[in-house]
Image (cartoon, rainbow, N blue to C red):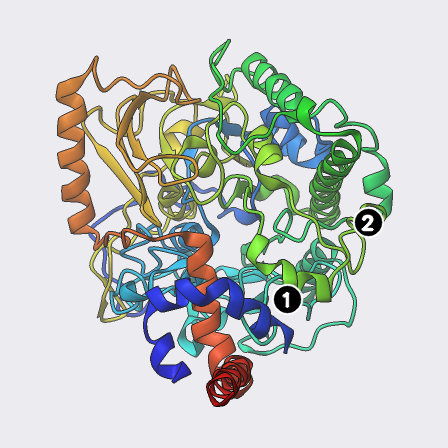
Amino acid sequence: MIESCLRSEKHVRGVLIAGLAICLSVSNGLASTVKPQHNASAQGQPKPNIVIMVADDWGFTDLGAFGGEIATPNLDALARRGVRFSNFHTAASCSPTRSMLLTGVESHRAGIGNLRESTPRAHFSSPAYQGSLSQRVVTVSSLLKDNGYRTYITGKWNVGSEPHNLPPQRGFDRSIVQGDTGSDNWDPQQRYLPHTDKVYWYEDGRTAVLPAKFYSSEYFVDRMIGYLDQDKGSAKPFLAYVGFQANHVPLQAPAEFIAKYKGRYNQGWTALREARRDSAARLGLVPQNTPLATLPTTLVWTAQDAQAQQYQARRMEVYAAMAEAMDHHVGRLVTHLKAAGQFENTVFLFLSDNGAEGSDYDLAQLWLKTQYSQDIDRLGGPGAYSIQGPSWASASASPLNGFKFFAGEGGIRSPMFMAGPGIQNTQGIYAGLTHVTDIAPTLLDMAGIARPSQNYKGQPIEAMAGHSLLPALQGHNAPLRQADEILGYELSGNAALFKGAFKLVKNLAPLGDGQWRLYDVVADPGETRDLQKQWPAEFASMQKDYQIWADAHGVLPVPSDYNPVMQVTINMILDYWLPTFGLWIAAGWLVPLAGWVWWRRSRRRT
């Protein structure tokens, strides 16, 4: 009976809350028609080393060099040495962004149109929503390795755990990676949500054995330094990709970093949001007096009682400490490269995979209470669980609108910079529209490697969609995209289309109503002034452009009752809890049902 009921998602939605409480208790063949725009090697320059640093869930102004108050001196020094991109876009969640970063191919065409956990079940049959890299894409790591690079990755992977999708088959010589969306930062085996049976770690493609206790940012840098040291005698250049968990939930940091921020956030999220907006404007990253949108998910700070304010302030203290701890370990990697004489010939790339995390995971509270403490005095430490929440997330995204999972600028405009040999821009900031698909072709151009357009080692592949950023990195401030060129986007029903200064966008609840809006995100990056009535022709034509783009990229509409948080729970039950604990779940429903039947029959006999 239970199995037949659970075949219907609508039934799952109807019984979810009651059932959840019961469940939780128990370079051969390479062909190319695209030439590198700039070939450093052809000009007698050595190929550069490349370090990619991916932060997890950082807001636009979390980084000091982007206007934030968090101490990130090592990243700031690199950013100010190179070029900061103030109009750089990703997807609004981790897996789609990482697929585009690695391949230069739009996420639906790369097979990861959505995070697997939040994908509607009706989409699973589509090649655009497999939740892992398509075999029709080639990674930049594979291309670099084919052309003489040593390649290493440590940290979060999250683009597929099938044997053909693990790092060794995707161009990495050495790897220690987490295959999941995240985990505890102190205990590598502790899940942050009960959507799998364990945390999956892989070293060089095999199940990894990790220390019982660690701190994620420190461990990932330690392992990367170890890989570099093992091959320090090699004359080959290297690619080093570090996928940090900071600042993915649960928010955790060493006590000495947390102590630095005590009392720093006692004025609340609205004051912080305004201060960051003003700081980013002074740096030239956004226009002066950029208006701030009012988010429906942001609470009124002054309406919170003293105890609630204290607890919320502590959450942000832990968030800031986690970011500073990551920066500290970035500094260790930089120091190591300087000592090894590799710093001057290394290109550094930093980005966040999406905007700040505003989800609250309320549906998992029953499970979390059995796994973690949420006491204020323990937040940030081992065994404790904290989140940033939607109100602080709006401040991390300041002055942008929205946060992770949504198509507002706060969800998809991320901090990014590049620094290293040959990178110079007199202004230090590039304001033109750029995208995560631009990174792979840029790195290939830096290494003097042609990008494949139709074929890789005898297999047909998707062509890279992005533009090389080299002109912007070498001081040219003209737009990389033509005024009439479109850039489309979709994730979980939240969608956007960029064209020149215009952005067409729609968001689902709770940040939107599913209706299209039109903004000038150059003058109004906070998306506060809807221009559809002032520009009706553009508003109509861009909707047509979006539909053409969506059809070409295999975008599917979400169900009318779709809710991403609820979908995560549905998928968790159907993909993990039911197959693993089916008998216990059935008993959880059948025992009360049998009791009710017995009671009804007893009453009739009486």
State which tag comes first along the sequence, 1 or 2: 1
Residue at disc 1, secondary structure = loop
Does residue 232 appear anywhere in the picture?
no
Question: Residue at label 1?
Answer: 191
- 563 horizontally vs 265: left or right: left
Q: Amino acid at mark 1?
A: Arg
Q: Position of residue 432 (x, y in %)?
A: 37, 25
The answer for how far apart the CA atoms under marks 1 and 2 are is 19 Å
Q: Residue at x 76, y 37 (%)?
A: 317
How many residues crowd around disc 1 within 10 Å: few (fewer than 14), some, or many (20 or more)? many
Quarter location, residue 283:
top right
Which mark, residue 254? Answer: 2
5 over 333 or under it: above or below: below
Q: Secondary structure beneath disc 2? A: loop
How many residues crowd around disc 2 within 10 Å: few (fewer than 14), some, or many (20 or more)?
Answer: some
Residue drawn at x 26%, y 24% is 500
Q: In this view of the protein, can residue 10 be seen by the observer?
A: yes
Point out residue 452 in the picture as x, y percentages from the top left corner: 27, 56
- The percent position of residue 124, horizontal first and vertical second, equals 30, 67
Q: Residue furthest bottom?
A: 605
Observer-side mark, 1 or 2, equals 1
Q: Is residue 294 above or below residue 30?
A: above
